Amino acid sequence: MPIVQADRLTRIGAALLKAAGASDEEADAVALGCVNANLAGHDSHGVIAIPTYIDRIKVGHIVPGAKWTIVRESPTTTVIDGHWGFGFHVNAKAMALTIEKAKTANVAACTVFRQSHVGRLAAYPMMAMREGMIGIATADSGRSPKHVAPFGGREARLGTNPISIAVPSDLEGYKGSGLAAMVEVLCGLLTGLGFGVEPTGRHNDGCFMAVFNVAAFRPLKDFKQEVAEFAQYLKATPPSEGSTGVFYPGEVEYIREQQRKAAGIEVEDATWDKLRALAAEYKLAAELDLT
């Protein structure tokens, strides 16, 4: 199993995506998003997904170069049609626009539909966090097969439906949590995407995102300090039997990211073989040193 440094893995991913038809901007966004997921230890959303994305390009489920459009907006809200573009690219643009609106109006929100897989959800609220704001992002599984049964049921009717919340603080990492049914409402029903399973099998991530300007509610400096104190209060909790300690949300990922930046990212053989095969298919093996 090879150990690969993050910058090389990003370069490999971007080159393969460009060869498959992605623009430079799209390829860089997807490759960086995947490698950042690897760095945080969320390997299920890392470079293992790149061959799948390329497969979806080949069958037309992802449309490289698609121009996302605003179909409805107000000073504080935006509805965005991704036109089946890369979720990493479309969602980042949507969050950036929402942050800009929140800078003026203090609170802003957007919905995004008809885009491909958005990757590790935490990436988007962390954009707001870096601007001194609270960021919230939720994503459903589109109309993909479901894995979670509603309370009292024995049949899956919900996606895993992550919710990620990031708040500015004087600590590294993000702070987050999640719920399934409300995500389906926000990302499936509010976007107009619908619910249930899409019979064509096309992956379609519906998203709801919002940004809140902390300074509209209280001084940012005071808030960040209190968040840090709250995190330390949580860490001071007596650990459960067998626990190695108490971690605030995002702390484990931050620690793992620092470790992997220094030591490299372990890529499972099956994924590495797929990346090498794609490099050979696109005649990039020598350029990417994947011979």
Image (cartoon, grey):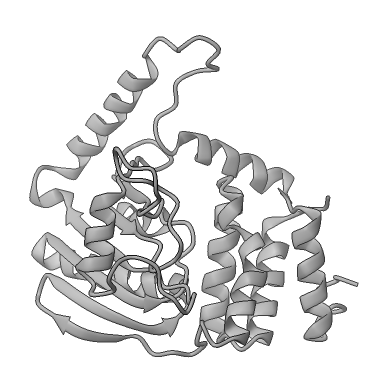
Residue 186 visible at all: yes
Which residue appears at 40% of the width and 30% of the height? 248
**Left or right of 118, for residue 11:** right
Which quarter of the image is occupied by the C terminus? bottom right
Tell me: residue 81, above or below residue 220. Answer: below
Specify the farthest residue to the front: 154
The quadrant where residue 137 appears: bottom left
Please, is residue 115 above or below residue 220 in the view?
below
Picture coordinates of residue 186, whole percent (x, y):
22, 61
Q: Residue at coordinates 32% horizontally, 44% vertically from top-left?
A: 178
206 in relation to 254, above or below? below
> What residue appears at the point 28 percent right and 64 percent down from the top-left corner?
187
- Residue for point 79% across, 78% down: 279
Asked whether 36 or 195 is in front, the reply is 195
Q: Where, by quadrant of the figure, is residue 282 drawn?
A: bottom right
Q: From this view, report whether residue 132 is shown above or below residue 95.
A: above
Residue 74 is left or right of residue 257, and the answer is left
Q: Where is residue 226 shown, x and y percent of the image?
A: 23, 30
Decide if residue 133 is in sight here. Answer: no
- Numbered-mark total: 0
Left or right: 161 in relation to 79:
right
Residue 38 x, y percent position in the rendering: 61, 52
Q: Position of residue 93 (x, y in %)?
A: 35, 74
